[in-house]
Image (spheres, coloured by chain):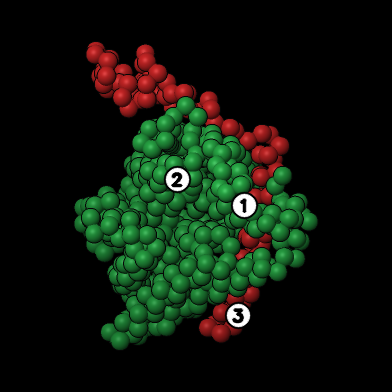
Amino acid sequence: MTETRGSTATPERARPARKGEAGGPLARASLFYRQVVAELRKVIWPTREQLTTYWLVVLVFVLVVIAIVSLLDLGIGWAMFKVFG
Amino acid sequence: MLTAFVNAFKTPDLRKKLLFTLFIIALFRVGSVLPTPGVDAAAVRRCLDPVLQGGSGNSIYGMLNLFSGGALLQLSVFALTIMPYITASIIIQLLTVVIPRLEALKKEGHAGTQKITQYTRYLTIGLAILQSTTIVALARSGQMFQGCNETIIPNDGILTLATMVLTMTAGTGVIMWFGELITDRGVGNGMSVLIFVSIAAAFPTSLEAIRRQQGWGTFIIVLAIGLVIMAAVIYVEQAQRRIPVQYAKRMLGRRAYGGSSTYIPLKVNQAGVIPVIFASSLLYLPVLAAQFNQNAGWAQWINANIARGSHPVYMIGFFLLIVAFTYFYVGITFNPTEVADNMKKHGGFIPGIRAGKPTEDYLHYVLSRITAPGSLYLGLVSLIPLIALVLINANQNFPFGGTSILIVVGVGLDTVKQIESQLQQRHYEGFLR
């Protein structure tokens, strides 16, 4: 399931258990990197269709909010200008 | 898709929530424009116009103004916006790790969490007094708008100044309440929604400034960059690592329960946009502190390096802070021990891994590995537009940087999803299939 050196034991125990495999910081970093890549391979990425729908929906939502806020600001700004000069 | 918007307004309780949120947003905007008593609003307007015309040419305030949606420079009642609240919650959450008493409170459950929230509110008020004093002092000494000789505060008696500080502090308290009201009775997370609104309010102005200064070509490039980044953000936000969970079949009386298989969705970016908000508001603190003492060596260094979003020192600091905060925030929001315990209680297990401690270790292992690319992504996405904007020489319009796009898209996505799930409870077809 997880990428470790040699054995299939859980990652926490695997490293210090084997003699001479503890390695320096560089080796540890590369192990971590390989583990990250292994986990990333199991990630489920959104499909193109999902991406387009989400993109459109978020775009519409953001534009609607910007429009509402701009209108509000115009109205409020006009009122403030009248009141405070 | 448009029918979903109509459906959202047809559902009575959802309509109520949406309208309530809109109402709070309207109040929030009114307060952001309403001048604080003692301020000469007309003088502020005369000083402000050249600043707005030149985009955010005055770079120090461009950034300060980003999260306030223009409220700060107008010296309005809500000039401080939610910044003190955000800063206070960062501090309290950091302290939870350090101070055993707070940690004990957090483990107490609901009652403890409420007490922590109460502490956050007190700290917010404290920070608000500090920040409003800074701003009032700046406005009085005329440093708020450099190169503008108007008297912003005509009558600077101690009573007037105290009233101003009091008003701004009270304004912060009201905003804090607004945020909590939206979280409780509206749509989305109140704190994020209010930041979202502030940024959205600043968008048209900064886009217009880009168009006027750089012409249509740059304007279109900036828009295109924004849309591409938006797609990238959505792509990563939707990515999940699904950890399979199998539930054992149980006989309770004569009926069989469970026996189903589900999964725990771990997002690549489990932390959302909160780390970005935290990092940028933390970097805003030294800039504010430097205003107290503008001639000191350290203050000048801060003004030269951190106050501008395009400076390498700022970029590196921002990136590192985001990565650190991502790990930190995932650490406090997702608790592998709790999840493992719950699974054990309900007879669930991850195939190939024993219940209890090994499950906890495994969850922790996956989470820490998957957060590494997640945090790098957050950091990079908030930097790429900065770099791109520098390349096409539009860097003075910092408000249109990666931070604002991340926050806008992240909050937009969360809010839309929340509306979506409420629609689905009512068996309507949502926006997203």
**In screen coordinates, is B307 left or right of B257?**
left
Q: Residue at x 24, y 59 (%)?
A: B101
> Picture quarter containing residue A78?
bottom right
3D distance between C-alphas at marks 3 and 2: 60 Å
- Circle 2 packing at 10 Å, graded few (<14), some (14-19), many (20+), is few
3D distance between C-alphas at marks 1 and 2: 30 Å
Residue A35 % position (x, y): 42, 24
Labels 1 and 2 in the same subunit: yes
Which of the two marks, 1 or 2, is nearer to us in this view?
2
- Write down the residue under mark 3: A79
The chain coloured red in the image: A
Which three-letter amino acid code belongs to the residue tagged 1?
A: Lys
- Write down the residue under mark 2: B345
Q: Of helix, strand and loop, which one carries label 3?
A: helix
Name which of mark 1 and mark 2 comes first in the sequence: 2
The chain to which mark 2 is attached is: B
Which of the image's four quarters has the C terminus of chain B?
top right
- Circle 3 packing at 10 Å, graded few (<14), some (14-19), many (20+), is some
Which of the two marks, 1 or 3, is nearer to us in this view?
1
Between residues B134 and A61, which one lies in front from this camera angle?
A61
- Circle 1 packing at 10 Å, graded few (<14), some (14-19), many (20+), is some
Between residues A55 and B304, which one lies in front from this camera angle?
A55
